[in-house]
Image (tube, helix red, strand yellow):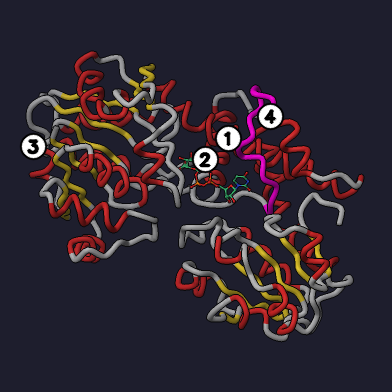
Amino acid sequence: MRIAMIGAGYVGLVSGACLADFGHDVVCIDRDPAKIAALEAGRMPIYEPGLEALVADNVRQGRLSFGTTLKEAVAEANAVFIAVGTPSRRGDGFADLSFVYDAAREIAGALSGYTVVVTKSTVPVGTGDEVERIVRECAPRADFAVVSNPEFLREGAAIGDFKRPDRIVVGTEDPRAEAVMREVYRPLYLNASPILVTGRRTAELTKYAANAFLAAKITFINEMADLCEAVGADVQAVARGIGLDGRIGTKFLHAGPGYGGSCFPKDTLALAKTAQDHGMPLRIVETVVAVNDQRKRAMARKVIRACGGSVRGKTVALLGLTFKPDTDDMREAPSLAIAAGLQDAGAKVRAYDPEGMEQARPLLPTVAFADDAYSCAAEADAIVIVTEWNAFRGLDLERLRRVMRTPVMVDLRNIYDPNAALRHGFVYQGVGRSS
Ligand code: UGA
């Protein structure tokens, strides 16, 4: 199969590299010449474990290449994937589809022979219909089908998720397009990943429903964590106690500072907007959005309480800034609201993140940055574990306590055993645990 991947962002680059690894010929196209030049020189625009080696290997094998113009790649392709960004539109939260529609217009001008145009970007219900209309309008004689094929990969685990998905969703009613998509994913379903072929609108909605459900699951356990603190229960034991019920499942029940990232916040908002537009408001999703927003800000108040009610003039050290480990992505990271809340209350904030500091600096211009966890904690009145990087799981607590002014630890990811922290002389506050 020959594949053109439009957009070399997170989803496009990972999908392109993995599809090349399946043996397909893939060209990744991006408008940004600097990004393409960096990729051609073997430099990744994002931090994702395993990606650099995967790209290098497939480039060496001649299956993966990069470019800034899509004409040739699209003309030769059996399938053209649209994997461009769909940011939240300012004002109403609806997904901004201008990049998707621009891509559709450009693709239309380059189609040759039967081609499957695949929307991989997360797009609201009905976008496939509009992409089809645009392509048809720009290229009335083109032989093509528009398919929805949402992606379920997670940052930090992207390659594994792409290569071993729980399922592949393909939204099309065109048998020729279905055959092409089955060929694209043959290595996966031969390997037991089910392929679900649905209507196009169903596939589009499935992606939003999945993210909204996961966001709701996290928000549920976060609220339960607050209740656990109030009544003297342990949220981790509650999560396990409910999660072992196969109908609930143990995953995505880690209480924390609220979900962030480029997907859950944007997709829950966009889904709520779609539902409102159709006169079918999703009250659970709307509440999840509101509760999660409030939670990020509430985490600063939690730190202030742990510091005895005031952080004025105190130094607070934040360990971890990215919205989750193994990424340098700062989008909607809880650390942003936490740092702002602490500074508003008069604290000096110092921070360290293993991979995210370059992205964080412009977003946190008044925060001081440290070179490692210990220098971040030096003379601090509290440390706050915001992101559960592995590097923070085995800190030398003795050394940490010695360098701090006041040994207060607020562990927003529950990565420390409260008793161990207490033994080392810390005042410890986790999430949803009464100690
Ligand atoms: C999420 C979904 O998990 C992917 O399936 C989906 O493909 C992707 O969005 C997308 O739509 O592109 P991602 O945003 O990379 O992936 O990260 P997650 O691992 O899902 O974490 C999202 C947020 O939830 C993070 O802030 C994380 O800390 C938080 N989280 C996750 C919790 O607080 N508790 C949990 O138990 C799990």
Magenta part, dominant SS: loop
Magenta span covers which residues? Answer: 244-257
Residue type highlighted by circle 3: Glu
- Nearer the N terminus, badge 1 or badge 3? 3
Q: Is residue 112 left or right of residue 53?
A: left
- Nearer the N terminus, badge 4 or badge 1? 1
Residue type highlighted by circle 2: Asp
Tell me if residue 238 is in the magenta stretch. Answer: no
Mark 1 vs 3: CB contact within 8 A: no
Q: How crowded is mark 2: few (under 14 residues within 10 Å), some or many (20 or more)?
A: many
Q: Which residue lies furthest to the right in this view?
A: 231
The residue identified by callout 1 is 212
The residue identified by callout 3 is 76
| Mark 2 close to ligand 1, CB under 8 Å | yes
Mark 2 vs 3: CB contact within 8 A: no
Q: What element carries label 1?
A: helix
Q: In which quarter of the image is the N terminus?
A: top left
- Nearer the N terminus, badge 2 or badge 3? 3
Where is residue 313 shown, x and y percent of the image? 79, 84
Q: Disc 4 to disc 1, how far (Cα)? A: 22 Å
| Mark 3 close to ligand 1, CB under 8 Å | no
Up/down of 330 relative to 61, above or below: below
The residue identified by callout 2 is 267
Asked whether 276 or 332 is in front, the reply is 332
- Nearer the N terminus, badge 4 or badge 3? 3
Residue type highlighted by circle 1: Ala
Q: Disc 1 to disc 2, how far (Cα)? A: 7 Å
Mark 1 vs 2: CB contact within 8 A: yes
Q: Residue at the location (14% across, 31% down)?
A: 78
Up/down of 248 relative to 335, above or below: above
Where is residue 159 shown, x and y percent of the image? 36, 45
Q: Is mark 2 on a helix, strand or loop?
A: helix
